[in-house]
Image (cartoon, rainbow, N blue to C red):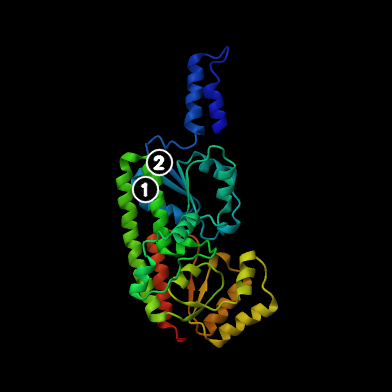
Amino acid sequence: MNTLRSRIVGGGPRRGVPALLLGLTTTLVLTSCGSGGGDTNGKLDVVASTDMWASVAEAVAGDRAEVEAIIGDNEADPHSYESTPRDAARIDRADLVVYNGGGYDSFVAQILSGDTEAPPSVEAFSATRERDQHGHDHDTAENHAESGHHEHGHEHSGNEHVWYEPSSVQQVAERISEHLGQLRPQHSAEFDRAAADLGARLDEVEQRIDGIEQRHGGTEVLTTAPIADLLLDRAGLDDVTPRSFVRSVESGNDPAAATVAEMQDLVDSQRPAVLVHNPQTASSLTERIRTRAENNGIPVVEMPETLPEGQNYTQWISGRVSALERALDESPNQ
């Protein structure tokens, strides 16, 4: 639609077309087809791939932007989401696009790569990888050494579920603030304060994760999908899930019979203190493992990929950390 706009605006008056009508036509095209530019109410237009990242963007933008998520259904799996022409149009008209990256919501990267005048974007996975490579994390290695923390969660090793690491979300919030400040320089200080406020709330969550590490570091856990690996690693927990099972789940294939037997034996051994379960990628197999864990007295902690209705990101991640903390505290397998 950008090409169409340029062609109509730059083509000059056409013979037999009244100037007033041409002006009205041009105005309509500019209003409905342009990329970015904000809404008529003066607010910026921010589009996020999922409601998780939309919530982070909302926390930074406040009332200065209209933020919408493409995926907000807690039954959907963003890995396999197929975009629509409407999704492409929403991204094309945005002032800023926020998405996860790392192969998680690849439909966004595909849409952006096909747009010669794509809007600016923040890719969470890349932002956090750059932090890891250049040491821009707010918690330095020296700080961890002084406080006795292990270096958990600072090398993602390709795990794309970066919203399960609050320090990564802080980094993304700062990137969002930078872009919004470039779009609305007169409000840049406001965006920076909002990002800092979000960071302060997430620091409190990080402190609670530190508490889990101090009390339960080294405790064995089992997962039905590698959704919360960054959180588990950050908390110093030992994920004993067979790697062959993880690879099968990630590729969407059924694990081999020997792998399934290994998982069942681990559950029956009652060694793992907790089973971490992603309900959005559940299958008949993972549901059987969940039931088997419950029958063996192993607490199950759900770690989904999208927000439940009525919760923002901070509330959600705080609740997931609380659920993990409670399950570990109450687990008989300690």
Q: Is residue 296 visible?
A: yes
Residue displayed at 36% across by 63% down: 202
The residue carrying pointer 1 sits among few (fewer than 14), some (14 to 19) or many (20 or more) residues within 10 Å by Cα, namely many
Label 1 vs 2, first from the N-terminus: 2
Could you tell me residue 241's position as x and y percent? 57, 77
Q: Is residue 312 visible?
A: no
Read off the residue under disc 1.
Answer: 61
Residue 267 versus residue 130: which sits nearer the camera? 130
What separation in Å lies between label 1 and label 2 (alpha carbons)?
A: 9 Å
CB under 8 Å between callouts 1 and 2? yes
Per the image, label 2 sits on a secondary structure element best described as strand
**Would you call the spot at circle 2 few (<14 residues within 10 Å), some (14-19), or many (20 or more)?**
many
The amino acid type found where label 2 is placed reads Leu
User: Furthest-right residue in view?
Assistant: 257
Residue 95 appears at what percent x and percent y? Answer: 45, 41
Give the position of the C terminus as an image quadrant. bottom left
Picture coordinates of residue 1, whole percent (x, y): 56, 33
What residue do we see at 60% from left, 71% from top? 246
Which residue does the numbered mark 2 point to in the structure image? 44
Q: Secondary structure at mark 1?
A: helix
Q: Position of residue 134 (x, y in %)?
A: 44, 58
Residue depicted at x 41% and y 63%: 166
Residue 76 lies left or right of residue 179; in this view the side is right
In terms of image quadrants, where is residue 321? bottom left
Residue type at mark 1 is: Ala
The numbered disc on residue 71 is none
Q: In this image, 147 relative to 108: left or right?
A: left
